Image (cartoon, rainbow, N blue to C red):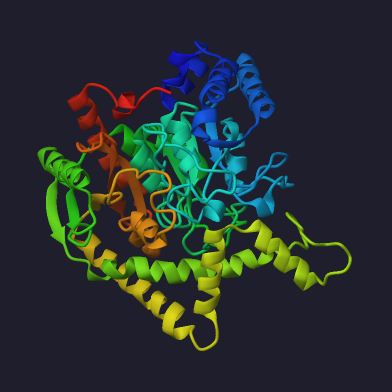
Amino acid sequence: MTDIIKLTAAEIASKIASGELTAVEVTEAHLARIEAVDEKVHAFLHVDREGALAQARAVDAKRAAGEKLGPLAGVPLALKDIFTTEGIPTTVGSKILEGWIPPYDATLTKRLKDADVVILGKTNMDEFAMGSSTENSAYGPTGNPWDLTRIPGGSGGGSSAALASYEAPLAIGTDTGGSIRQPAAVTGTVGVKPTYGAVSRYGMVAFSSSLDQGGPCARTVLDAALLHEVIAGHDPLDSTSIDAPVPPVVEAAKNGTVAGMRVGVVKQFSGEGYQAGVVQRFNESVELLKSLGAEIVELDCPSFDLALSAYYLIAPSECSSNLARFDAMRYGLRVGDDGTKSAEDVTALTREAGFGDEVKRRVILGTYALSSGYYDAYYGSAQKVRTLITRDFEKAFEQVDVIVSPTTPTTAFPIGERADDPMAMYLADLCTIPTNMAGNAAMSLPCGLAPEDGLPVGLQIIAPAMKDDRLYKVGAAVEAAFVEKWGHPLLEEAPSL
């Protein structure tokens, strides 16, 4: 079992295709791992043992019949519990959807199944993807496999922890302000936020519709690229879906290089609040890029300093609109319906019981920002800042091919440390939010351990919209250089569970 769970997704797929392993063997090994360690980690909210084994048997039957298998056929995956899955629960980490069984698959879920990827189950997350630590889940926090007393990032901490604890070789996350990249950074894994509109949002429970984006999570850049290729592409069911070919991400991951590329370093992604060890590892990464043949260009993007403030007006405003559908009338939790109360009373009681503190905080903030007399002052002004951020990116990409930065200002902080300080929690997404505001593509990959605490540090790579292949080209080159430097993948240093 140990040998199987340490394989990359690409290696697993190859061994299944050649007959060296069966999909059932691979699935059983990961289910056994989940059973052995997930009580400590709490990466999963629901494990679909029977469904996963049925999918694995179908892959083995296809291979036995001589059918051609896809590049990830038989590879297990952990799915963030924000995508609808026909026949198994989708809770979005909230009590208001506890026990809800969707009648249909999200487009992303369907594409995974069509590619014969084996879905192990649904992973823990901050309620409605609102958070930076997975402490806001109604079902309890997830631990970071590097140190179970620390956060695994958020909102997709369950997916990142599943990877770091070898419970799955692949995972899916969603990124509204950094919720794929920030968990990847603090768990020593790889996470990619594709260009906005590149991966369908149909069947993904909405938080902030103009920012939300699903994407791949993995332990290597190539594995992330293989998963990216499976889930991306135009979807007529999603009005924001881009009708354009998927960039050649797998080819880029297999031919990584930065020779001759111009790499930007933004001065706004530094300064007060950045942990010394994070800055040290980032600076070393910049020097590494230079040694690999990249030209380093310093950039000034002044509007980035306003990104956090603008984000926390736009995202709550959109969430207050999206979450209005949870009214106790159509699906999910219903409280107080004893025949004596009005529909309004039942709705109010249900929301009081079903939504957690962070969700209530953002709904109230967003409703206020959209209210008459305040719309232009708050929401309207935030959208103007968003335009300035987009323009800063456009100017930057006239000078460089990609931008690099730390993914997060600090390493994983202890569970509970920022629970009573929302502003401190929000600062975890300081480097990731500008990309969501502009709709660009970005990746986080490991760039070493912080010397003061021995915890992973993430390097963020940002590319222009629909140039996602540049992320993989640069990421693969950096990853290869790190592996050569250490002689083994960074994650091998993670403490065993």
Q: Which of these two is toward me, 372 or 435?
A: 372
Q: Which of these two is toward me, 191 or 411?
A: 411
Residue at the limit of the structure toward the top, as seen here: 20
Image coordinates of residue 473 in percent, x first then y, are 28, 40
Residue at the limit of the structure toward the bottom, as seen here: 373
Report the residue at 49% width, 32% height from top.
41
Q: Is residue 361 left or right of residue 222?
A: right
* Residue 462 shows in this picture: yes
Image coordinates of residue 226 in percent, x first then y, are 44, 35
Image coordinates of residue 259 in percent, x first then y, are 16, 41
Residue at the limit of the structure toward the right, as seen here: 339
How many numbered dots are placed on residues in this image? 0
Report the residue at 66% width, 63% height from top.
352
Give the position of the C terminus as an image quadrant: top left
Q: Within the image, what quadrant is residue 254 found in?
A: top left
Report the residue at 18% width, 47% height from top.
276
* Residue 256 shows in this picture: no
Image coordinates of residue 437 in percent, x first then y, are 39, 64
Asked if 151 appears above or below 437 in the picture, the reply is above
Q: Which of these two is toward me, 427 or 466?
A: 427
Q: Is residue 271 left or right of residue 214?
A: left
Q: Is residue 351 left or right of residue 26?
A: right
Report the residue at 37% width, 64% height from top.
438
